[in-house]
C-alpha cells in the first residue's frame, strides 16, 4: 500500500501530531508521515509485539486475572541494560491500524483482564488516544494503565487526560550524568519530575476496588541498579518528600544482566572511569544492596508500596515478543 493511501486512514488528530513529532522530550520535530524517523525509529502507525494477559506486574495491577498488557515497539530511551531490547529497538512487532488496536483492547477485556496495560507507548500516544476513545464507545470499561519509562513530555501526557486511570512510570535516575551514560538522556531527572507531577495532577490519590486492584492513581517504580544504592535513596527521598502517601512505590530487585549490554563491548573512546561504571552492569543486585534500600525506604516512612522477594533477576521473566494477540484470529469476536 502506498504511503499516501495508508496515511489517509489516519485521523486529523493523528496527522497533526505525527507530521511534526514532539511527543517526547527528544523533540525530534520530524514528519513521520513522510517516512522520516526520529529517536524512537517508529512511523505513524502503532507497532505491537504482544497483547496478552500478563501476571508479573505489581499485585494491584495484575491480580489473579492478569493485566491486559499491550507491548509497543520502539522507545525514546536507549538504556544500555535494556531487558526488552528486541522491541525497544524495533526489531520485533507488527504494524497495525488504530481500528485493530481498539479491537485488541476489547479482546483483552473479554479475556478478563483487570486493565489495559499500555507498555512503552509514548511514541504512539495519538494512536492510543484514538483507539481508547473508540473502544470506550464500544464498551471498554476497565481501567487504562500507562506503563512507561518516565521520560515523558507534559504536553503529550495532557493528550491522555481523561483516558488514563493509572500511571505506572519508572523513575530511573536522579543523577544527570548517570542518566546520560546509561540511557542517553541527560535531562531525564527534570523530565521525570515534570511528568510525574502531571500524572499525579490527572489521577490524584490512589483508589482500589474490593479485590485490591488499583482503579486510579500513580504507582512509581524504581529498578535498583548494581552499585547504585545511594542513587535509589535519593530518588525515594525525593518521591516521599514530594508526594508522601499520595502515590504508591515499587522497589524492584529484578535487574538482569543481558548479553547485549554495552559493558560487553566498551567503545574505544570510553575513558577508564566509564568502563569501570559499565562493569557494574555485568552482575545482579546483591541481597545486601536490596535489603539496605528497603531498610532506607522503611526508615523514611514509606509504607504504601511493593518490594520483591526471591529470584526475580532471570531472563525467563521477560515475555516472548511473538505477536501473541496482535493478529486477529478466527476465535476473536
Image (cartoon, rainbow, N blue to C red):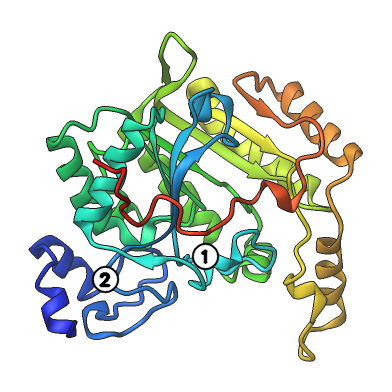
Position of 241 relative to 252 (above/below):
above
The quarter holding residue 141 reads top left
Residue receiving disc 2: 44
Mark 1 falls on what kind of element? Answer: helix
Where does residue 298 sit, x and y in percent of width and height?
74, 22
Please tell me which of labels 2 and 1 falls first in the chain.
2
Q: Is residue 15 left or right of residue 253?
A: left
Q: Residue at x 29, y 63 (%)?
A: 96
Mark 2 falls on what kind of element? Answer: loop
The quarter holding residue 82 reads bottom right
Residue receiving disc 1: 87
Where does residue 259 sit, x and y in percent of width and height?
77, 69
Q: Residue at x 85, y 33 (%)?
A: 292
Q: Is residue 298 left or right of residue 242?
A: right
Q: Is residue 159 visible?
A: no
Q: Is residue 172 left or right of residue 205?
A: right
Query: The N terminus is located in which quarter?
Result: bottom left
The quarter holding residue 206 reads top left
Q: CA distance from mark 2 to mark 1?
A: 17 Å
Q: Is residue 311 visible?
A: yes
Outermost residue toward the front?
Answer: 330
Amino acid at each position: 500500500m502506498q504511503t499516501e493511501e495508508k496515511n489517509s486512514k489516519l485521523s486529523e488528530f493523528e496527522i497533526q501530531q505525527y507530521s511534526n513529532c514532539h511527543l517526547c522530550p527528544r523533540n525530534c520535530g520530524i514528519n513521520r508521515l513522510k517516512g522520516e524517523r526520529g529517536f524512537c525509529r517508529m512511523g505513524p502507525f502503532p507497532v505491537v509485539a504482544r497483547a496478552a494477559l500478563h501476571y508479573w506486574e505489581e499485585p494491584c495491577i495484575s491480580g489473579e486475572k492478569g493485566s491486559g498488557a499491550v507491548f509497543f515497539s520502539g522507545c525514546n530511551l536507549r538504556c544500555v541494560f535494556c531487558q526488552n531490547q528486541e522491541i525497544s529497538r524495533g526489531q520485533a512487532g507488527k504494524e497495525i491500524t488504530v481500528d485493530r488496536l481498539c479491537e485488541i483492547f476489547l479482546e483483552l477485556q473479554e479475556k478478563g483482564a483487570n486493565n489495559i496495560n499500555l507498555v512503552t507507548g509514548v511514541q504512539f500516544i495519538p494512536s492510543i488516544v484514538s483507539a481508547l476513545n473508540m473502544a470506550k464507545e464500544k464498551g471498554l470499561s476497565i481501567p487504562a494503565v500507562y506503563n512507561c519509562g518516565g521520560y515523558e513530555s507534559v504536553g503529550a501526557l495532557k493528550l491522555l487526560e481523561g483516558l488514563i486511570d493509572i500511571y505506572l512510570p519508572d523513575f530511573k535516575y536522579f543523577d544527570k550524568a548517570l542518566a546520560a551514560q546509561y540511557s542517553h538522556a541527560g535531562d531525564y531527572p527534570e523530565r521525570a519530575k515534570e511528568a510525574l507531577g502531571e500524572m499525579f495532577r490527572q489521577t490524584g490519590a490512589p483508589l482500589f476496588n474490593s479485590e485490591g486492584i488499583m482503579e486510579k492513581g500513580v504507582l512509581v517504580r524504581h529498578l535498583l541498579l548494581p552499585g547504585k544504592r545511594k542513587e535509589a535513596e535519593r530518588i525515594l527521598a525525593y518521591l516521599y518528600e514530594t508526594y508522601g502517601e499520595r502515590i504508591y512505590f515499587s522497589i524492584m530487585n529484578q535487574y538482569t544482566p543481558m548479553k547485549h549490554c554495552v559493558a560487553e563491548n566498551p567503545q574505544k573512546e570510553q575513558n577508564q572511569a566509564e568502563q569501570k561504571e559499565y562493569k557494574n552492569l555485568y552482575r545482579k543486585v546483591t541481597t545486601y544492596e536490596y535489603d539496605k534500600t528497603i531498610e532506607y525506604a522503611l526508615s523514611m516512612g514509606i509504607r504504601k508500596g511493593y518490594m520483591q522477594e526471591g529470584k526475580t533477576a532471570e531472563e525467563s521473566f521477560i515475555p516472548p515478543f511473538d505477536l501473541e494477540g496482535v493478529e486477529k484470529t478466527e476465535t476473536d469476536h
